[in-house]
Image: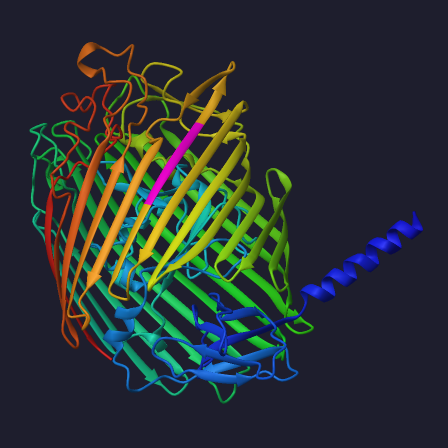
């Protein structure tokens, strides 16, 4: 046994020495800000890589005479590094004053895959602006990985789905911090203006443990514009054919080592439209005012610490329901049916990086939000108050030549949520009014280890979190990237996740409709194991670059919680499901880059999300098994004109059973498949852009999406029975103006 152990150790060390011939480094600008997507290539070869979102890169060493690395980034001067004996480099690139900013953004490709153990798709400004992205939810209309689903057509509540699963199973982060959860979950995706967003990082399946124990189906990390990179002035105005208009203004000030970005946003409501004649508004009336302020401190002369401070305030009112509804007269009464949402939301966060050594940093993260929400669903009043505080402190250290990185830290999450539900008039078929409290404190410890070899990157992580009601929970994760060649990547990931459900705040459809509710009193946290496999293959044909990617993900749930609409007529049963609950997701994507001006992307998704009851599989409702997405973009060589065309085909979805409903309220077992086409045209001048387009060109609409619209105070009323678009064709026009 001793000989065997010794042999294994020797073999391992030998293999490690072979894999360790790697040059690593970090690419930044002169202020020390990481440059994501910088090209790193050996001179006179085709061997290269790109930097990740932290600016880090790893490239196999070349034992030739020159050993010169070429490091380039759009908008910056190319740097040549003669490597010599050093194996870890920090490279600062200098901006090229001869490159105009508008041309810089124009030449970047629409979306990219980050060079990380997990497959991270990066959506930049160019991709976001391919459609009328007025909010975070609208930023994914050209994306095949994320679906923005409406969960209540009367208030336009939305969720962002990954792997076909409800949005509650993925983490939505703001600058890496959990600010969209609980009360902020149903309306948050629609309240963040798209003009605030610089990048969106999308990861499917298991991810890093640094951000917490959630991230079951994936992670969406929104990065707002950094002050130091933002234009001095940015203005945007947008209006559509429904009468809704939006206005945005960004202003940047830089003084010494401090930079500040101030952002204002206003949304004015749409007109009253009722095309299907059901007596309900097709478009929600929205009044929104939000302010955002971000500070950055970064002194290159004293690079011992960097910090970011973010502040945001939101005041929003949403109103929907009967075309005759007036909140000043009918709020909370049975005279005229209406739904009214009043939101006041404030958030703050800080991120500070202390440099304690050449290879060691100490990172401190703090975020908090408070939201007060008063909502009326007919005669039901819902008042929610939430305070959420998250803190983390960890050390980030590189060993040796920089190919070994370890992060060790601790965290604490505090959440306090009070929900008051009052029936202002008797509803004899409903009995869930009362006061509901959620109060938890979750301290945690975490460790993450990353090893980078010439062909492989292995990341392992483990969290230990103590739930105050359930004790310790452990979250292990492992991610492996095999870079088989310059053009071939294979990734494997596996991990566990937990989630604490917020029943009412995350499922507004339960309150919006009039189903009876059976709510278990002893709900346990949801658990899930996720396994993922994906590959990326790049092909080069003449001057055309072709990227083929494929994904396969399996998610196995324990104690899953979801409203069961099928067990009893007109009833939602909320409890832990202890049987087999599984999600299978497969995706194939083909991206053609014909030139810097012309690209085409086509993707197919197959989803099978089901539970087994007594050995019989039952698909979960509102999830299509088949989905196609295609997007093409063309810009003229001078980038003055750009045209974008997007197509989506959504297959049939199973609908909740209405077999035992009265005849007027019976619905088919499955929805119809449908397709949607969107077109946008953009004209650019030096500092000015004019854009306009048509969404849903052929005007497909699900007519009568509200079940029981004729009896909104009856027990068969359900405004969450939508399976397709309900607004119909939309024309829009907008202008952008920026000063660098």
Please state the horizontal and vertical placement of residue 403, each as a whole percent of the image: 64, 68
Please state the horizontal and vertical placement of residue 571, each as a whole percent of the image: 35, 19
- Report the residue at 38% width, 30% height from top: 434
Name the image quarter holding the C terminus: bottom left
- Report the residue at 18% width, 59% height from top: 266
Residue 260 quadrant? bottom left
Residue 212 can be seen in this image: no
Instruction: Identify whether 9 is placed above or below 342.
Output: below
Residue 147 quadrant? top left
Residue in front for this viewpoint, 672 or 316 = 672
Query: Is residue 733 toward the left or the right of residue 429 in the image?
Result: left
Please state the horizontal and vertical placement of residue 149, each as a whole percent of the image: 30, 40
Instruction: Identify whether 121 is placed above or below 295.
Output: above
Please state the horizontal and vertical placement of residue 478, each as a whole percent of the image: 61, 49
In the rendered structure, which segment of residues is drawn in magenta?
603-609
- Report the residue at 23% width, 23% height from top: 717
Asked whether residue 134 is drawn in magenta, I would say no
Query: Is residue 16 toward the left or the right of residue 603 in the image?
Result: right
Asked whether residue 606 is drawn in magenta, I would say yes
Q: What is the total number of numbered labels drawn onto the structure image?
A: 0
Q: Residue furthest right?
A: 2
Residue 152 quadrant? top left
Residue in front for this viewpoint, 521 or 153 = 153
Residue 404 can be seen in this image: yes
Q: Residue furthest bottom?
A: 301
Q: Main secondary structure of the magenta part?
A: strand
Query: Is residue 462 toward the left or the right of residue 617 in the image?
Result: right
């Amino acid at each position: 046994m001793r000989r065997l152990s010794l042999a294994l150790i020797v073999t391992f060390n030998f293999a490690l020495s072979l894999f360790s011939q790697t040059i690593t480094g970090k690419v930044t600008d002169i202020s020390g800000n990481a440059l994501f997507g910088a090209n790193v290539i050996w001179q006179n070869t085709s061997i290269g890589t790109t930097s990740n979102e932290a600016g880090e890169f790893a490239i196999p060493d070349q034992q030739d005479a020159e050993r010169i690395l070429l490091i380039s980034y759009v908008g910056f001067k190319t740097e040549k590094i003669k490597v010599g004996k050093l194996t870890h480099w920090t490279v600062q690139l200098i901006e090229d004053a001869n490159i105009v900013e508008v041309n810089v953004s124009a030449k970047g490709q629409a979306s990219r895959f980050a060079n990380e153990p997990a497959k991270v798709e990066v959506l930049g400004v160019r991709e976001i602006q391919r459609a009328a992205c007025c909010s975070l939810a609208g930023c994914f209309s050209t994306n095949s990985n994320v679906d923005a689903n409406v969960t209540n057509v009367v208030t336009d509540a939305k969720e962002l789905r990954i792997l076909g699963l409800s949005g509650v199973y993925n983490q939505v982060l703001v600058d890496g911090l959990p600010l969209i959860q609980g009360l902020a979950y149903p309306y948050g995706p629609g309240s963040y203006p798209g003009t605030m967003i610089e990048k969106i990082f999308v990861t499917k399946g298991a991810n890093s443990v640094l951000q917490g124990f959630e991230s079951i189906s994936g992670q969406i990390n929104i990065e707002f514009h950094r002050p130091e990179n933002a234009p001095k002035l940015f203005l945007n105005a947008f209006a559509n054919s429904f009468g809704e208009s939006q206005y945005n203004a960004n202003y940047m000030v830089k003084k010494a080592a401090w930079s500040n970005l101030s952002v204002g946003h206003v949304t004015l409501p749409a007109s009253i439209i009722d095309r299907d004649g059901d007596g309900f508004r097709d478009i929600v009336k929205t009044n929104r005012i939000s302010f955002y302020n971000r500070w950055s401190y970064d002194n290159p002369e004293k690079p011992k610490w960097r910090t970011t401070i973010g502040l945001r305030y939101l005041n929003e009112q949403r109103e929907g329901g009967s075309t005759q509804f007036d909140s000043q007269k009918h709020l909370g009464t049975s005279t005229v049916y209406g739904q009214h949402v009043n939101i006041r939301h404030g958030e703050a966060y800080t991120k500070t990086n202390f440099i304690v050594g050449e290879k060691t940093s100490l990172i401190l993260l703090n975020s908090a939000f408070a939201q007060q929400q008063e909502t009326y669903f007919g005669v039901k009043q819902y008042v929610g108050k939430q305070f959420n505080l998250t803190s983390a402190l960890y050390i980030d250290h590189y060993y040796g030549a920089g190919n070994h990185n370890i992060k060790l830290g601790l965290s604490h999450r505090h959440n306090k949520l009070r929900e008051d539900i009052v029936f202002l008039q008797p509803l004899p078929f409903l009995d869930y009014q009362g006061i509901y409290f959620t109060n938890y404190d979750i301290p945690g410890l975490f460790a993450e280890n990353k090893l980078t070899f010439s062909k492989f990157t292995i990341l392992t992580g483990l969290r230990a979190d103590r739930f105050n009601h359930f004790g310790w929970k452990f979250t292990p994760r492992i991610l492996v990237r095999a870079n088989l060649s310059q053009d071939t990547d294979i990734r494997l990931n596996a991990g566990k996740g937990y989630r604490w459900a917020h029943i009412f705040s995350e499922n507004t459809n339960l309150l919006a409709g009039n189903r009876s509710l059976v709510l278990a009193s002893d709900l346990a946290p949801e658990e899930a194991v996720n396994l993922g496999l994906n590959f990326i293959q790049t092909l080069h044909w003449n001057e055309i670059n072709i990227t083929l990617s494929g994904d396969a993900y399996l998610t196995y749930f324990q104690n899953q919680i979801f409203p069961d609409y099928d067990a009893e007529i007109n009833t939602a049963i909320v409890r832990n499901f202890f049987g087999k609950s599984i999600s299978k997701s497969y995706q194939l994507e083909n991206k053609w880059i014909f030139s810097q001006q012309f690209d085409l992307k086509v993707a197919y998704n197959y989803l099978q999300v089901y539970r087994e009851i007594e050995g019989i599989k039952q698909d979960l409702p509102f999830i299509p098994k088949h989905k196609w997405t295609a997007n093409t973009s063309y810009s003229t060589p001078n980038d003055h004109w750009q045209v974008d065309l997007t197509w989506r085909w959504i297959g049939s979805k199973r609908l909740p059973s209405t077999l035992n409903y009265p005849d007027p309220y019976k619905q088919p077992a499955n929805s119809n498949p449908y397709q949607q086409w969107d077109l946008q045209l953009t004209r650019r001048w030096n500092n000015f852009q004019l854009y306009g387009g048509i969404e849903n060109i052929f005007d497909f609409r699900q007519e009568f999406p509200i079940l029981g619209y004729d009896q909104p105070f009856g027990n068969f009323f359900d405004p969450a029975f939508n399976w397709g678009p309900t607004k119909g064709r939309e024309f829009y026009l907008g202008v952008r103006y920026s000063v660098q």
